[in-house]
């Protein structure tokens, strides 16, 4: 993660200081639980909490680790320096390193989930506001990038809202899946650690005890978590791609807000580029990059190996930091997006009524023409619009075969834009409710 694409709260969550605070809490609560069970003296458990407000010396921990080559042992050694070796002798009793590492990782992912859920909620609010604002703002719908039939800008925003609302549900489910802790010992059998210790620590840290762990929490949970982040990233890119298309010079139906003093190009002063949404496209690639390694982490040897460890040390902070930034940036883009309704109408009318071809096709079949004949009649007039820049309605009115089925009034009525917006309210009700 780099400062350019980072926000302070998420970055702090992955700091060494935060990690060591969580490690301390796990160890201290475990000692309390063992004291409650009569396994260690109460005074030893109480002594651990003397370090509650200590700012752990990261340089000192790194110095110890340079000798021990073991991060958890280095931390425990440093903790004992604060509370005394005799008082600390029951630290980590019956536990293994992964009891601390995995439980801590899941706590961090849960907290990251809360930040991401808040981000998505804010994005949903922005999408809903713009959808309502442009509920009936007519624009051309496109399939394969080609003009299809009229739609509205509000429906475009509503579509993105519905997608992000599904992502909000996915994110909440991912948080629930990752909200487990494990303190089960060297191979997960609780041979040297009472299961009640795990239950106590998890309750204190708002986690659920893992159903069955080996030396680690099963990584299918993490695979599901990072897959969810990857899906959200793809939704971000989906929205960003639509905005990038709309900002193309030939289209210009919308554009990112361009502030006073902003520069679009070092060489061409006229440029106003969609740099924010292009940036979001790039960030989405980085976020999705974590999905395959997370899936591969599910496969580990026997009770545990550490092939997953180096992966997670990278993807956990980087992916959550990038997604947090991307969601925040997209919310700002949506909030400030400049919409050009006049250009939308201009683009839709570029081919002089051609987008009403299906209405004419259906009217011909309803008037008695076979579908094959009706298609040929409509298409031959449509091609004149494509190739000769003719007016579609004029061509239909002058086509004797078409007129043998449809009156002038029938044809003109098929060019009413209101026909295409008559169900917008129903769709909005489906998306937003009352």
Image (cartoon, rainbow, N blue to C red):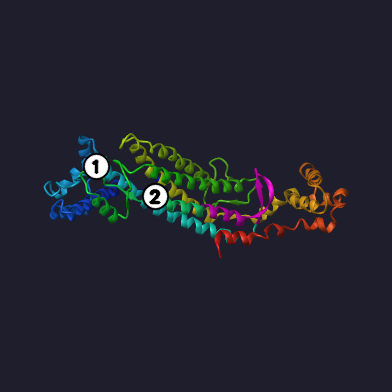
In the rendered structure, does residue 247 fall within the stretch colored magenta?
no
Q: Which residue is mark 1?
A: 96
Q: Which residue is pictured at 27% across the width and 56% down the height?
A: 204
Residue 290 is marked as: none
User: What element does badge 2 sit on?
Assistant: helix
Q: Quadrant of the C terminus?
A: bottom right
Q: Is residue 212 shown to the viewer in this render?
A: yes
Q: Quadrant of the N terminus?
A: top left
Q: Is residue 1 shown to the viewer in this render?
A: no
Q: From which residue to which does the magenta span run?
A: 138-163
Q: Dot 2, how many residues are within 10 Å of its Cα: few (below 14), some (14-19), or many (20+)?
A: some
In terms of image quadrants, where is residue 135? bottom right
In the rendered structure, does residue 149 fall within the stretch colored magenta?
yes
Q: Nearer the viewer, residue 204 or 325?
A: 204
Q: Which residue is mark 2?
A: 177
Q: Residue 250, image x and y in percent?
A: 65, 45
């Amino acid at each position: 993660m780099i400062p350019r694409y980072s926000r302070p709260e998420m970055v702090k969550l992955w700091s060494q200081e935060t990690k060591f605070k969580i490690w301390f809490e796990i160890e201290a609560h475990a000692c309390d639980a063992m004291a409650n069970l009569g396994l260690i003296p109460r005074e030893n458990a109480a002594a651990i909490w003397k370090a509650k407000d200590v700012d752990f010396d990261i340089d000192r921990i790194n110095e110890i680790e340079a000798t021990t080559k073991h991060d958890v042992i280095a931390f425990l050694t440093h903790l004992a320096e604060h509370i005394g070796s005799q008082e600390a002798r029951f630290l980590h009793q019956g536990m293994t390193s992964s009891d601390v590492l995995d439980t801590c990782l899941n706590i961090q992912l849960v907290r990251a989930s809360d930040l991401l859920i808040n981000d998505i909620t804010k994005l949903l609010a922005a999408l809903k506001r713009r959808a309502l604002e442009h509920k009936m703002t007519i624009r051309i719908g496109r399939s394969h990038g080609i003009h299809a039939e009229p739609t509205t800008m509000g429906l475009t925003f509503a579509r993105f809202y519905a997608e992000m609302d599904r992502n909000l549900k996915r994110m909440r489910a991912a948080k629930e899946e990752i909200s487990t802790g494990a303190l089960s010992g060297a191979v997960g059998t609780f041979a040297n650690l009472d299961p009640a210790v795990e239950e106590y620590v998890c309750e204190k840290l708002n986690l659920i005890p893992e159903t069955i762990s080996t030396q680690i929490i099963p990584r299918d949970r993490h695979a599901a978590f990072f897959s969810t982040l990857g899906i959200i990233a793809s939704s971000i890119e989906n929205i960003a791609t639509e905005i990038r298309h709309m900002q193309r010079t030939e289209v210009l139906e919308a554009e990112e807000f361009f502030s006073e003093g902003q520069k679009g190009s070092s060489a061409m002063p006229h440029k106003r580029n969609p740099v924010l949404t292009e940036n979001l496209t790039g960030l989405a690639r980085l976020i999705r990059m974590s999905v395959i390694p997370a899936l591969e982490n599910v496969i580990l040897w026997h009770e545990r190996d550490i092939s997953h460890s180096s992966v997670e040390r990278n993807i956990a902070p980087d992916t959550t930091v990038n997604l947090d930034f991307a969601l925040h940036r997209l919310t700002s883009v949506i909030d400030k997006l400049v919409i050009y309704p006049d250009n939308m109408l201009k683009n839709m009318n570029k081919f002089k009524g051609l987008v009403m071809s299906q209405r004419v096709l259906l009217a011909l079949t309803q008037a008695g023409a076979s579908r094959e004949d009706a298609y040929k009649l409509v298409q031959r007039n449509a091609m004149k619009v494509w190739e000769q820049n003719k007016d579609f309605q004029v061509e239909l009115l002058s086509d004797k075969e078409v007129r043998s089925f449809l009156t002038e009034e029938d044809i003109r009525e098929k060019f009413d834009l209101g026909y295409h917006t008559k169900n917008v309210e129903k769709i909005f009700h489906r998306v937003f409710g009352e």
